[in-house]
Amino acid sequence: MKNIILLLGPVRTGKTTLGGLLSEHLGLPQVSLDQIRWRYYSEIGYDVGLAQTIRQRGGFLALMLYWQLFDAYSVERVLAEHSNCVIDFGAGVGVYESQEQFARVKRTLAAYRNVFLILPSADRRESLQILRERDEEPPPDLNFDFNAHFLAHHGYYDLAKFTIYTKGRTPAESCAEIVALAGGQTSDA
């Protein structure tokens, strides 16, 4: 049986920080999909040159839409390749404009018990304000509020089995809540 904790959430919500704390607390390795997804993307034809052209012509939003073509595969691959770990997914994982991509990721995550959505607050407007304050250097060609879209989209809420609200809590307290909700263990049963 795989022991795994999966962390979802918008940009600057603390997924990587919590992943590190959980990794240390549980004695499991941490895997950040943002660090390894390029290898998975390239397995199915991701074109760096095309990505650069898309960004030059359409900006960061167009680039993110191109990345979405490869995301479901990267989620499948990271879960097939890693067990007994904590995985923090990139901010876009779970929020897809394609219903086909979303359904594919939903099928993939359905078997996993410990899928946590990390948000600052239960109030979406408050979460958005907190996340905006944390994002000191958004991409210069960003002409779209990704976190507003991510928070309004159904994806995270449909995929997560648990939601952790971090406002007013230390990362260690949020980590302890995740461990408690996971039943003190991380079995996928």
Image (spheres, rainbow, N blue to C red):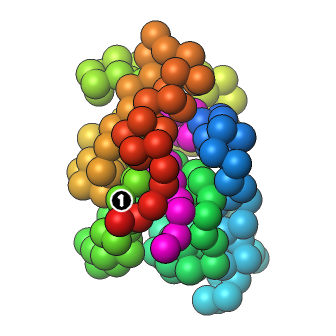
Give the residue pinned by disc 1: 113
Would you say 145 lies left or right of 163 here? right
Which residue does the image show at 37% across and 40% down from the upper left? 181
Question: Dividing the picture into quarters, in which one does residue 22 lie?
Answer: top right
Does residue 145 show up? no
Quadrant holding the C terminus:
bottom left
Residue type, mark 1 in image: Arg
Q: Which of 141/177 is in front?
A: 177
Residue furthest out toward the top: 168
Compared to residue 162, the image places residue 169 above or below, namely above
Compared to residue 15, the image places residue 45 above or below, namely below
Label 1 neighbourhood size at 10 Å, few (<14), some (14-19), many (20+)?
some
Quick one: SS at disc 1?
Answer: loop
Q: Which of 115/145 is in front?
A: 115
Would you say 100 lies left or right of 84 here? left
Part of the protein shown in magenta:
1-16
Q: Position of residue 140 (x, y in %)?
A: 67, 38
Compared to residue 110, the image places residue 146 above or below, namely above
Which residue does the image show at 52% across and 21% down from the upper left? 173
Is residue 118 in the magenta section?
Answer: no
Which residue does the image show at 48% across and 50% down from the upper left? 185
Which residue does the image show at 61% across and 64% down from the upper left? 84
Q: Which of 117/74 is in front?
A: 117
